[in-house]
């Protein structure tokens, strides 16, 4: 399974907003059970989409300004950015098929 890199408030602009590829951001926390459930799916998609979609994680506890900026109230929240714009937002555990269906139209 592909390891997914973490982004922070300091590199979010470069790694997500300025990325050439669409970027799926997994807003997560180590203490969150649904985040642990979705983690293997996110890693699997990162491997399947390599070269087409960049997949990153953002620790909710360590990056409160990004959480507030995007109005994230619950985790896991997954957001798809393309061309610096937020295109999709999914909150809570999602099966792989549902995540794929939301992302693929933007690839």
Image (cartoon, rainbow, N blue to C red):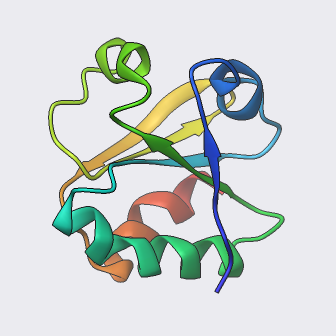
Q: Is residue 36 left or right of residue 20?
A: left
Q: Position of residue 66 (x, y in %)?
A: 43, 20
**Residue at 35 percent of width and 20 percent of height:** 64
Which is more toward the observer, 79 or 101? 79
Quarter of the view holding residue 46: bottom right
Q: Position of residue 105 (x, y in %)?
A: 53, 58
Which is more toward the observer, 104 or 22? 22
Q: Position of residue 80 (x, y in %)?
A: 50, 44
**Residue at 56 percent of width and 37 percent of height:** 81
Q: Quadrant of the C terminus?
A: bottom right
Q: Is residue 88 left or right of residue 72?
A: right
Quarter of the view holding residue 94: bottom left
Which is more toward the observer, 62 or 94? 62
Q: Would you place residue 82 above or below residue 18 in this image?
A: below
**Residue at 25 percent of width and 29 percent of height:** 72
Q: Position of residue 83 (x, y in %)?
A: 69, 29
Q: Quadrant of the N terminus?
A: bottom right
**Residue at 21 percent of width and 58 percent of height:** 32
Which is more toward the observer, 28 or 45? 28
């Amino acid at each position: 399974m592909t390891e997914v890199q973490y982004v922070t408030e300091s590199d979010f602009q470069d790694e997500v907003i300025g990325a050439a590829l669409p970027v799926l951001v997994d807003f997560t926390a180590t203490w969150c059970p649904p985040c642990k459930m979705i983690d293997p799916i996110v890693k699997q998609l990162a491997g399947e989409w390599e070269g087409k979609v960049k997949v990153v994680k953002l620790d909710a506890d360590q990056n409160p300004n990004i959480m507030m900026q995007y109005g994230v109230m619950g985790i896991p929240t997954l957001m798809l950015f393309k061309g610096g714009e937020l295109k999709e937002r999914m909150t809570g555990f999602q099966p792989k098929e549902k995540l794929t269906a939301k992302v693929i139209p933007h690839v």
